[in-house]
Image: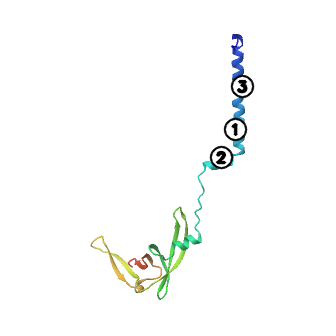
Amino acid sequence: MQIPPLKKSTFYTIVALVLLAGVVIGALIISYAFSKNREQVCLATQPPVINTDLTENQVQTAVSLDTNKMMSGKVVSKDTNSFTLQVSVTNPLDAGNSVMTTVKVPYDATKDEVIIAKQNTNTSTVETVKASFSDIKVDQQVLLKILNGKKTIFLSPS
């Protein structure tokens, strides 16, 4: 069927009005659907929330005296064959989230050792000098290295 030449402009006007009305109604429907589901749509664009709180179990695991660990801290108290070390446990995901805790470190003179690290004044090398448990002082910073059940306590020179 062919449209008569006189009615072509009317036909194109009606088609344009119908398309315009469809675009307007479609935009209204989409904006209404977006406003009703805004929370779900915006949640998908936000990064996930990560819980960076340290749990008691994580702190206990970090300061346990298992093998192949290193921890650094300050000696808070000292007994006959042990000392208490105050360490800071920090969450790597949130450096501001840290916890100070204490751990009691037993000392066995037969297998554990105490070492003082001294810098040689002539060269830039560091010498290690064997020390004894009595060289550990309260309020002293120490580095504790546990490797295969043997504890090595590094002291800074006083």
The correct choice, above or below, for 43 with respect to 94 in the image is: above
Give the image quarter of residue 8: top right
> Which residue bears the numbered disc 2?
41
Q: Earlier in the sequence, mark 2 or mark 1?
A: 1
Q: Residue 12: x and y, percent?
A: 69, 19
Q: Nearer the viewer, residue 117 or 63?
A: 63
Left or right: residue 39 versus residue 57 is: right
Q: Nearer the viewer, residue 42 or 94?
A: 42
Q: Which mark is residue 91?
A: none
For badge 2, the amino acid type reads: Val
Label 2 residue SS: helix
Q: Earlier in the sequence, mark 3 or mark 1?
A: 3
> Which residue bears the numbered disc 1?
30
Give the image quarter of residue 27: top right
Label 1 residue SS: helix
Left or right: residue 139 versus residue 116 is: right
For badge 3, the amino acid type reads: Val
> Which residue bears the numbered disc 3?
18
Q: CA distance from mark 2 to mark 1?
A: 13 Å
For badge 1, the amino acid type reads: Ile
Q: Residue 152: x and y, percent?
A: 41, 78
User: Callout 2: few (<14), some (14-19), or many (20+) C-alpha neighbours within 10 Å?
Assistant: few
Q: CA distance from mark 3 to mark 2?
A: 31 Å
Q: Residue 53: x and y, percent?
A: 59, 65
User: If the image is split into quadrants, where does the C terminus sit?
Assistant: bottom left
Residue under the image location 59 percent in, 54 percent down: 48
Mark 2 and mark 3 in contact (Cβ < 8 Å)?
A: no
The correct choice, above or below, for 85 with respect to 13 in the image is: below
* Residue sitting at the far front: 1
Q: Earlier in the sequence, mark 3 or mark 2?
A: 3
Residue under the image location 70 percent in, 34 percent down: 26
Mark 1 and mark 3 in contact (Cβ < 8 Å)?
A: no
